[in-house]
Amino acid sequence: MAEEDYKGIWIFAEQQNGVLNPVTLELLAKAQELKAHNGEDIYAILLGSDVKALAPTLIAHGADKVIVAEDAALASYSARPYQQAMTQLAEKYKPSIILYGATSLGRDFAPRVMVSLKTGLTADAIDLGYDEDDVFYQTTPAYGGSILAHIVILECRPQMATVRPKMFVPLEADESRKGEIITETVSVDAEDSYEVLDVTQKISDHEPIDKASLLVCGGRGIKSEEDLKMLGELAELLGGQVAASRPIVDNGWLPHEEQIGQSGATVKPDHIINIAISGSVQYQVGMQNSKCIISINHTAGVPIFDISHYGAVADYRSLVPAIIEEIKKRK
Amino acid sequence: MKILVFVKQVPDTDDVKLDPKTGNLKREGVQSMINPLDANAIEAAVQLKEKYGGTVAAISMGPPQAEDMLKKALALGCDEAYLLSDRAFGGADTLATAYTLAKAAEKIGDYDLLLFGRHAVDGDTAQTGPATAAYLNVPQITLATSIDVQDGWVICDRNLEDCTQRVKAKLPALVTVCGEINTPRYPTPINIMKALKKPRTVWDAAALEADTARTGIPGSPSSTKKVFEPEKRNTDTKYFEGSAEDMAVQFVDMLANEHLV
């Protein structure tokens, strides 16, 4: 079959316990751009058991069609039944593109579909689009993030990618949007060789950093663990939270959950205050969509200033206490 | 118990530069090392062997120089090493790599557990492990932070975005491990000496009976169309000026404008 016979932009609708992962709606939004270019319909692929009720939400957020495949063996995620279901659907409909969120589930699942469909899968893309030659590309940071690459899948279909969460903004829900819900039957084997024994929700004394509206972040230039208290005090005064770039976490000063960047979380708070962070590409990938970027660094010209709305070339050890003092004075 | 642990040789740097003329990576002077998370996978395999008995084989696909890394894997406690090396394997994406690794696992045969690091620091795809599991049609556990084996099942904790899970998979199974799982040991001089006597095997495509249309560049659906240094996104930056106290006043004025104080 020729490449042009494959049609449809598919978004894997990741859900667990009937709750959609937000990355699904982000991908539906990005899919509108791809559709504007290639004119193909946008499909959301909903696998599970008793999940049909999520279909209208997917349509309201931009899906033209929702394929629902329900089976008891798909009730909770395990790799092989999901692999079987997606493979059968893709072989029947022959989409040109399948996108998955680059979540722990998506990255567990998508490589198995790659093998059964014998196609390409780009990992952890941060952007997608069509280039000057009309080729669909996925952008990924390569070699630790100092270089970006355009990955293409020229001859195989579907062209697949896992896409990093929080890169795109979901569309506002439009309940009047029309879409088609297609029910499909898949033939999957119950997985008797894999079992989830126990799940413990992570409990934290504060909200996760990707939900905070203001972050105060420390980086490589922070001289001691003690100095993080200063960052904590500033964050508290402004109703925000402390986060960090990788060196702070590598030093063991903060847990991995509070790391921003390519190997950590992607955040887009209303305000982010970067303290002693030079702004490697790996870090920028994780925070560049923040609304207002404010940076303090003692070296002029470091990359973080290129993306900052406000900057102070100063030693944080004198400036941050002065800011704390000034805030207290005005309260 | 027969454990296969898959290891990759990676550049010992995260600061790779492009040759401005060719667009290729500058590799001169860059040392290579064992992928750090693969060292965790070796340590997990050796600890299981020490606890329950059995053998550990280290497998790597790479150029002939990867022998040195495999010698290190042997010094860390693996019993034998396999290097999959052939010009026909070069330039492989994760689909072609997983195909080649799965062919080696099948040729070795009778494996109980396959271990991978959760990702390689150079590519960071985290796809080769699950894809190899798919080729071998075995269950997988990704992102393991602990591992044990009981009654023919491998039991792991997994660290996910909003929860931790305890899961089990029936052997044979494939597990990818996170750095938290253990601290890799250092090779002792005695073990480095012993390693030299351990069996090392090199297999090419013919030895693996691999279809070379499915290895290397011909077997790779994805390719890199271009690499580029990231565009500088120049935002109009408003700088605060003066002494620390002056800057602090301007800084807090800005916070007030943003309704933060």
Image (cartoon, grey):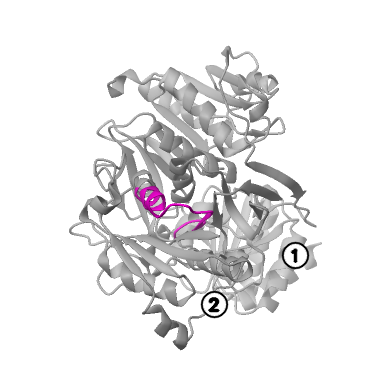
- The numbered dot on residue B185 is 2
**A224 is higher (above) or lower (below) than A175:** below
Q: Residue at x 28, y 32 (%)?
A: A155
Label 2 sits on a secondary structure element that is: loop
- Place residue A233 in its image quadrant: bottom right
**B142 is higher (above) or lower (below) than A224:** above
**A250 is higher (above) or lower (below) than A58:** below
The magenta stretch spans which residues?
A: B100-120
Q: Position of residue A163 (x, y in %)?
A: 49, 41
Q: CA distance from mark 2 to mark 1?
A: 50 Å
Q: Residues within 10 Å of mark 1 (few under 14, many from 20)?
A: many
Q: Residues within 10 Å of mark 2 (few under 14, many from 20)?
A: few
Q: Nearer the viewer, mark 2 or mark 1?
A: 2
Residue tagged by mark 1? A327
Q: Nearer the viewer, residue B100 or A260?
A: B100
Q: Residue at x 72, y 54 (%)?
A: B260
